[in-house]
């Protein structure tokens, strides 16, 4: 397998099966029409997977994945505030989860249910525009969801290349840039409908400079209708 195809395979595995060139934002018709009004959101703890791609294969980078997970809530909160949303803060701090095992278990369950739905979202993201995706009672039964109009689920996957891989790529005429893709789903906390699904892509050193992800994430909310 060539390095170009290997990189494409990594991209597909880490971030879902999006068609190249497809729109990166998918809004539910209720959100676009103003029927669904989102003023307060609860951001679930993000899940990130950063992979090192080198001459001998790939390895998962746990510490680097945590860097991304820690940076994303603030970046996404800032992007959503620009859409006139208020953020429910402090619900999922490490301290809060460690002190409340019932909450920790509930969060794990709702995250797992979203991951099951995400496979379908990745296969047919355009169906969000037809209002076809919902998490149903799994969301309405999530007690903390009552504090917000919507829940925000975040999944990210990134690749960093070793120096050797970059040198080999340069020799082969292939640019081996580090990159990360962030998928964000906004789910109505009252009925479980997926109201928005967006994707952002960031190239460059996003680990040392997480702020690089800000603009792409802001752009992934371009189709979000600001409620008046």
Image (spheres, rainbow, N blue to C red):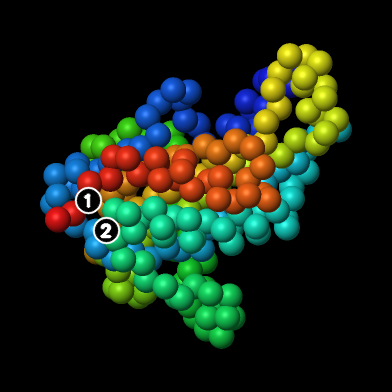
User: What distance separates the C-alpha of mark 2 from that of mark 1?
Assistant: 7 Å
Say few, some or many: other residues with alpha carbon within 10 Å of mark 2 (under 14 / 14 to 19 / 20 or more).
some
In the rendered structure, the answer to whether residue 192 lies left or right of residue 177 reads left
Name the secondary structure under disc 2. Answer: loop
Asked if the residue under mark 1 is in contact with the one under mark 2, i.e. CB atoms within 8 Å, the reply is: yes
Name the secondary structure under disc 1. Answer: loop
Residue at x 46% of width, y 43% of height = 215
Q: Position of residue 115 (x, y in %)?
A: 49, 51
Label 2: which residue?
Answer: 84
Say few, some or many: other residues with alpha carbon within 10 Å of mark 1 (under 14 / 14 to 19 / 20 or more).
some
Residue at x 56% of width, y 45% of height = 212
Camera-side residue: 216 or 105? 216
**Vertically, is 77 above or below 222?**
below
Camera-side residue: 36 or 205? 205
Q: How many marks?
A: 2
Label 1: which residue?
Answer: 226
Quarter of the figure with the C terminus? bottom left
Residue at x 46% of width, y 63% of height = 44
Residue at x 85% of width, y 30% of height = 164
In the rendered structure, the answer to whether residue 110 lies left or right of residue 82 reads right
> Which comes before the other along the chain, label 2 or label 1?
2
Q: Position of residue 1 (x, y in %)?
A: 75, 18
Q: Position of residue 120 (x, y in %)?
A: 42, 40
In the rendered structure, find residue 191 and report the number of the disc placed on it: none
């Amino acid at each position: 397998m060539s390095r170009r195809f290997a990189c494409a395979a990594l991209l597909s595995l880490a971030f879902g099966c999006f068609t190249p060139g497809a729109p990166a934002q998918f809004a539910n018709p209720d959100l676009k029409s103003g029927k669904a009004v989102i003023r307060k959101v609860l951001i679930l703890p993000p899940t990130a997977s950063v992979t090192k791609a080198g001459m001998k294969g790939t390895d998962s980078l746990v510490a680097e994945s945590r860097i991304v997970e820690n940076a994303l809530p603030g970046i996404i909160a800032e992007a959503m505030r620009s859409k006139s949303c208020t953020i429910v803060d402090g619900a999922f701090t490490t301290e809060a989860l460690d002190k409340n095992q019932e909450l920790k278990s509930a969060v794990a369950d709702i995250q797992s249910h979203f991951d099951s739905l995400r496979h379908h979202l990745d296969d047919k993201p355009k169906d969000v525009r037809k209002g076809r995706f919902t998490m149903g009672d799994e969301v309405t039964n999530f007690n903390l969801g009552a504090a917000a109009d919507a829940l925000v689920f975040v999944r990210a996957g990134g690749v960093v290349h070793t120096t050797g891989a970059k040198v080999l790529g340069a020799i082969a005429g292939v640019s081996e840039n580090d990159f990360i893709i962030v998928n964000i789903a906004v789910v109505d906390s009252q009925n479980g409908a997926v109201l928005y699904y967006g994707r952002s892509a960031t190239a460059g050193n996003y680990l040392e400079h997480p702020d690089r992800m800000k603009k792409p994430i802001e752009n992934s909310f371009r189709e979000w209708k600001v409620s008046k």
